[in-house]
Amino acid sequence: MFKVEKVIDAKGQTLIQDPPIARFFFQSTITSVLWLAVRLYVGYDFLVAGWHKFTTPAWMDGSGSGIIGFWKGALGTTASGAPVITFDWYRGFLQYLMDTNSAGWFSYVIVFGELAVGVGLILGAFVGLAAAGGLLMNFAFLLAGTTSTNPVLVMLGFLLILAWKNSGYIGLDYFLLPMLGTPWWKPGKAPAPATRMSAPAAATR
């Protein structure tokens, strides 16, 4: 289950294979059912959050009032007097957005970003990219001192990125990824098979 093997490709390069348990979860189409459940959970969370903001004038009227309050709170201090944001570079980034009156357009980025992540994960379209976008937003909220469901979504986001090849197999990625030539090669263009190293050869490397 956890055995790691080495193989030699057509160019003579040594490749370290993933253990069987990793191949099962991140390559097998059988586990795509599991990833479907994860996708729907994470995607629904983002879709609901994005739709709530989309139907709230404070987020969509261009004033940025929906996010300004969040920024002010993040730039403040805790009851003990410590800054809410731990990292100076991120505090400086939010302060720059405040000083340049960027709340209006940045609100649209968050709203449509959450909606795009939600739709992408639910439909199974470019799951790896959708999960990466969601992960970026989760990290942004965490850096600003907001916990909520973000730690759980971060963990699930990482797993969906690792399972980018099979997490959307029950979804649009079943059609989209082969059109791009990945992760399944096109007929007639199959790569040369790698050969497994014998035990003595493996021991010498």
Image (cartoon, rainbow, N blue to C red):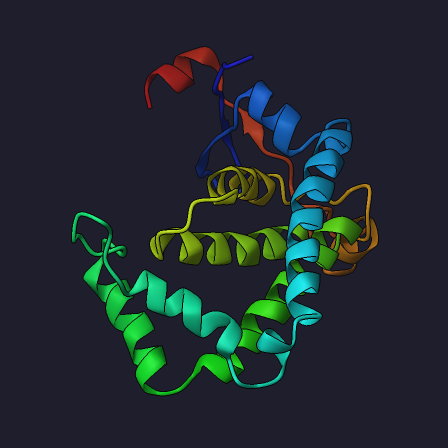
Query: Closest to the observer: 126 or 9?
Result: 126
Quadrant occupied by the C terminus? top left
* Residue 181 visible at all: no
Q: Nearer the viewer, residue 28 or 138?
A: 138
Q: Is residue 154 above or below residue 83?
A: above
Q: Is 121 placed left or right of 171 in the picture?
A: left
The single residue placed furthest to the front in the displayed view is 79
Q: Residue furthest left?
A: 81
Rendered location of residue 193, percent (x, y): 64, 36
Q: Which residue sits at x=43%, y=55%?
A: 141
Quarter of the image for residue 32 reads top right
Query: Depth check: 23 or 110 in front?
Result: 110
Residue found 51% across the figure and 28% down from its top: 17
- In the image, residue 75 lies at what x, y percent? 28, 65
In the rendered view of the protein, which quadrant contains the N terminus? top right
Residue 132 lies, in percent from the top left, at 54, 54
